[in-house]
Image: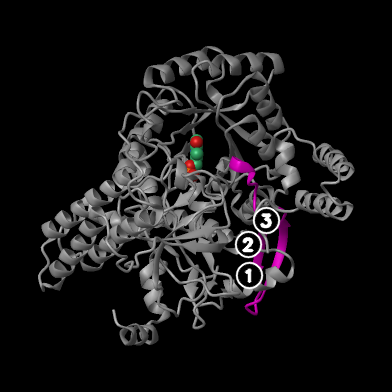
Amino acid sequence: MTKSKTNTDQSEWTVQDSSLLYGLERWGNDYFSINKAGNICVSPQGKDKEGLDLTHLLNELKGRNLTPPLLLRFDDILEDRLKKLQKAFEDALKKYEYNNIYQGVFPIKCNQQRHVVEKILAIGQKWHFGLEAGSKAELLIALSLINDPKALLICNGYKDERYIETAILARQLGRQPIIVIEQPDEVQRIIKANKILGAAPLIGIRAKLSSQSSGRWGTSIGEKSKFGLSIPEILQAVNQLNSEGLLNELTLLHFHIGSQINDIAVLKNALQEASQIYVELNRLGAPMGFLDVGGGLGVDYDGSRTASPASTNYSLQNYANDVVATIQECCESNNVKVPRLISESGRALSSHFSVLVFNILGTTSISTEIPPINGNECLSVKNLRDTLNTLQDICNHTSIDISKLQEAWNDALKFKEDALAAFRLGFIDLTTRATAEQLTWACAKKIIAHIPNNSLIPEDLRVLNATLGETYYANISIFRSAPDTWAIEQLFPMMPIHRLNEKPNQLGHFADLTCDSDGKLERFIDNGKVKSLLELHSLKTNEDYLIGMFLGGAYQEIMGNLHNLFGSTNAVHIRLTKDGKYKLDHVVKGNTKGDVLHAVEYDSEQLLERLRMASELAIQKGTLKINDAQRLIEHIEVSLRKSTYLQE
Ligand SMILES: *Cc1c(COP(=O)(O)O)cnc(C)c1O
């Protein structure tokens, strides 16, 4: 590409081009857009309303000493998501004239942060939105935060006697806990607790469905799943409850077919099966009344609207319609009153509201410059130069023969191997080895620039692109802030939050701060596919380059770990006010180095004291000046109180 061409491209590049390139409109759900200044704007009420310029916000947060990496939580988006979920179900109920209500619960495990759970309960109050607890600690949260007697508290997870007794007593406190039997032996524990307390809990049963699921969490259902009762076990539980006079408390049927259901067909099968079980339980004499369809409502991370792992082939409304229609059809044809519908949608509710913004510390790339000929060069270097010339010839043709490119690349790799072998044996020096490596990458660059778009590209040529990509050093730990990108190769939309009126002139991936070779982000959304390099801009001196990771509000925070002792980032709760301005509701301080050291049993004071003693010794020996000793101690004292990330 000539220089003048680049310049015209540059002037023609618009924010619409950026929007298309990063798929913003496809995954952004109208919450995110790009303004004329080329910055991402957040508009919780939809993009027609005045949005908040993220870069502007980041600048002002900097003034408050809140620097990236930062987790921005837009509580208005959380509110909008909850409203949309509620509305989708209400519309479906109306459409099918369903003769009961929808009453959702939030699965706490998705995001346990107090401000988040409190917010959801406050927003959901008018619909008596409740909580789902999957452990004893989560039960504690749910018990103390819910004070609406009509809100449901679904008790999932493994339950010992104390868990069950607590739920029974909470019922007397005026709450509505429903103990969902997930393991056959929980029936006996419920019976025992009932005898001890002389009071019964509301009871639900989680069914192990046989419908085949797909995707990452496909094993959440089927005979081998970890949770739920098989049909024979359900029958046995009903008999046991009946003989203890507890069948009257059996009110709920639950199933959960795994998170991020990609394909609506999977859900339909499960709904049909569960509805039949619901009807049968009714026939067996249980009063029933609730059908809880669990979680699994997916998020369209890549905006492709397909059944690919990062997407869903259905909308929120499709989901609600299918739940309502399928259950209604089965109940009505069996003359059973339709149940109150519960969903435990976590991911769908809490993904959109948080945006992780991180800064780039620097970049590196492999040098592809062609080194000048240096006297009489060794054979492998000469061969590499010949290969480069051959490539030049191949690329001069109008139609390029892929097999010839492949052949030349194989040669280049062979000659590079020869050069490395010669180096190991001491035949060539460091400079010659560098020349050989650079020539190899120059060959790679030539190939990449001329690979036709339309043909099937052999794998080893395709990955060349990624090898030559620029590495952007990101001021985060992916293990802390985006663990699922590593653990389950999850994709999140990522893009610069500013300079979007400038054409990105680099292809790059991110490397994080950890000393772990897995600490990288090199899989990016590509409308149903995955690409290994993201279009990015070159860094400018004295200007932060800020990247946003979107849709990460579910699971990432709590699954994140302390690998390399990188702790939580600062988090800020932001609310938009009417005039396009904003208000900080909460600032949740991230971990300091003192905090993370404490987590692995170090006492900051003790560490400091040891260093003080060591510096006294060094002062006495004369290797350290008093001034410098003080400086050292001061650095450490300050550092212990500060974030685990790099700061200017
Ligand atoms: C994890 C879980 C959920 C939440 O699933 P999402 O896919 O996040 O909606 C709901 N119910 C149960 C029982 C779960 O284990």
Depth check, front residue: 210 or 72: 72
**Residue 635 part of the magenta segment:** no
Q: CA distance from mark 2 to mark 3?
A: 8 Å
Q: Is mark 3 within 8 Å of ligand 1?
A: no
The answer to whether 340 is drawn above or below residue 406 in the figure is above
Res 406 seen here: yes
Q: Which residue is mark 3?
A: 570
Vertically, is 559 above or below 365?
Answer: above
Q: For the residue carrying disc 3, how many other residues have a C-alpha within 10 Å: few (<14), some (14-19), or many (20+)?
A: some
Q: In this image, 576 relative to 292: left or right?
A: right
Q: Which residue is mark 1?
A: 58
> Measuring 54% from the left and 58% from the top, which residue is drawn there?
474
Q: Position of residue 493 (x, y in %)?
A: 44, 59
Residue under label 2: 68
Q: Residues within 10 Å of mark 2 (few under 14, many from 20)?
A: many
> In the image, residue 451 lies at what x, y percent?
20, 64
Mark 3: secondary structure: strand
Q: How many marks?
A: 3
Q: Earlier in the sequence, mark 3 or mark 1?
A: 1
Is residue 300 something that shows in the picture? no
Q: In what quadrant of the picture does the N terminus appear? A: bottom left
Region in magenta: 562-589
